[in-house]
Image (spheres, rainbow, N blue to C red):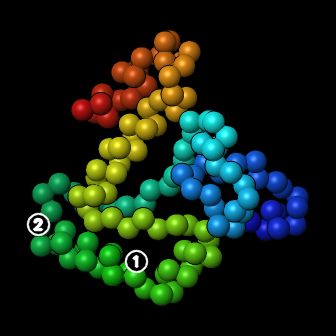
Amino acid sequence: MPHLRTGKVKYIGAMTEKRLASVPDTPTFQEKGFKVFSASAWGLSVPKGTPADIVKRLEEVLLQTTKDPDFLKKSKDLEMPLHVLDGKAYAEYLTEYRCRLSSPLGEGPLDKVIKPSKRLPQAAQE
């Protein structure tokens, strides 16, 4: 964000669902009428067949980490909003997010030419 503060760069819109706290006067692209959205999702996965007690312990430790004051401050300083989810909720989020990305332009000319089955790998459609 340093370039924004010096005026060398001007935000024209945020590709987030809500306005950014650092530039509250900058609308989202959705507010401007564009059906676009972008987010970074970070998660941890383990190999299939990992014992449930190990998965549970990893999840507990990760959730504890996201409550650490230093971690929260650093995340805020970097303008990386946290949406902490447990494993099941994160899997559901990834499925929903993948579907949102499958048609970034919404209903339009591209949808008539490129069918969804050609935009997503077969595994993503199941």
Instruction: Identify residue for label 2.
Output: 51
Image coords of residue 98 (percent x, y): 39, 40
Kind of residue at disc 2:
Pro
Q: In 3D space, how far apart are the residues under numbered discs 1 and 2 (Cα atoms)?
A: 23 Å
In the image, what residue type sits under mark 1? Answer: Thr
Q: Residue at x 18, y 72 (%)?
A: 56
The quadrant of the rendering that contains the N terminus is bottom right
Q: Quadrant of residue 60?
A: bottom left
Q: How many marks?
A: 2
- Using the rendered view, name the quadrant where residue 100 is placed: top left
Given contact means CB atoms under 8 Å apart, are the residues at marks 1 and 2 in contact? no
Closest to the camera, between mark 1 and mark 2, is: 1
Q: From the viewer's perspective, is residue 74 above or below residue 32?
A: below
Vertical order, 68 against 81 (above or below) = below
In the structure shown, which secondary structural element does the residue marked by tag 2 occupy?
A: loop
Quick one: which residue is furthest to the bottom in this view?
A: 69
Of callouts 1 and 2, the N-terminal one: 2
Q: Is residue 93 left or right of residue 80?
A: left
Residue at the image point whose x is 54% and y is 74% from the top: 75
The quarter in which the C terminus is drawn is: top left
In percent of width and height, residue 48 lies at 17, 54
User: Which numbered tag is attached to residue 66?
Assistant: 1
Please name whichever residue, 72 or 30, is drawn nearer the observer in this view of the structure.
30
Measured from the top left, where is residue 22 in percent x and y?
A: 69, 67
Circle 2: is it few (<14), some (14-19), or many (20+) Cα within 10 Å? few
Residue 86 in the figure: left or right of residue 30: left
At which x and y percent is residue 80? 55, 67
Name the quadrant containing residue 122: top left
Name the residue rendered at 50%, 55% in the picture.
Answer: 40
